[in-house]
Amino acid sequence: MNWAMKEKSYSQRRACALVGIDPRVYRRKSKRPADTELRTRMKELASERRRFGYRRLHIRLRREGWEVSWKKLYRLYREEGLTVRKRGGRKRAVGTRTSMAIPQGPNQRWSLDFMSDALEDGRRFRVLNVIDDFSRECLAAVVDTSIGGARVARELDRIAELRGYTPRRSPTLNGAPVLLRRAGRPQGSRRDRQ
């Protein structure tokens, strides 16, 4: 408005028409009190109690003897830019992470990736892909409606027997890392038969 009237020498009526407001709205002076004392006290309380929103601040101010409606307090709360501050995010690991070593030959590291899709009739199926990170060779693609942990271990054992080697590390792309060593489980145990 002011820019149009100063820079372009528009009349007040024409500038208001450009913006789309009535000239009486532009000329109207606010009759609201400044409420500086209430604003400062509200800011003090909000800084003391950072998790208090306007409703709890209204209760505190009423206890202190301030006669103010919650609607007015909400307007002042918004005008002052006060908001309930968010809680801190989840704690992350402190320290530097070591970068993953690049494999220098085949069978040094395999990656596992689980993918999921649905058939036309709505039944879901999963695909377990095992990939050698050095040669980018797909060692296995296991397709089934359900692939449990025992099945994953069995497939990895089968691949290790065919390749004649078990990699030291096996990160997954979509899920928790799978440890390839079966810690002390005897062959033919119940978990191996699943």
Image (spheres, grey):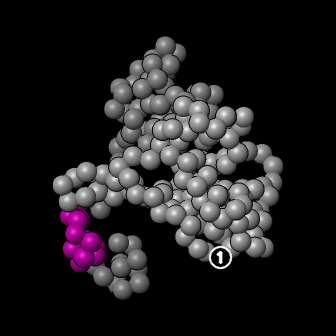
Quadrant in the picture for residue 161: bottom right
Front-lying residue, 78 or 121 = 121
Front-lying residue, 111 or 10 = 111
Task: Please determine whether, in this image, residue 17 is positioned above or below residue 123.
Answer: below
- The percent coordinates of residue 121 (x first, y second) are 18, 55
Q: Quadrant of the N terminus?
A: bottom left
Residue drawn at (52%, 15%) of the image: 64
The crowding category of the residue bearing disc 1, from other C-alpha atoms within 10 Å (few below 14, some 14 to 19, many at least 20), is few
Front-lying residue, 48 or 4 = 48
- The percent coordinates of residue 62 (x first, y second) are 45, 17
Q: Please give the range of residues in magenta.
A: 12-24
- The percent coordinates of residue 94 (x first, y second) are 78, 45
Mark 1 lies on residue: 135
Task: Please determine whether, in this image, residue 166 is positioned above or below residue 20.
Answer: above
Q: Which amino acid type corresponds to the residue marked 1 in the rendered image?
A: Ser
- The percent coordinates of residue 136 (x first, y second) are 61, 74
Q: Is residue 77 at all visible to an observer of this figure?
A: yes
Front-lying residue, 14 or 186 = 186
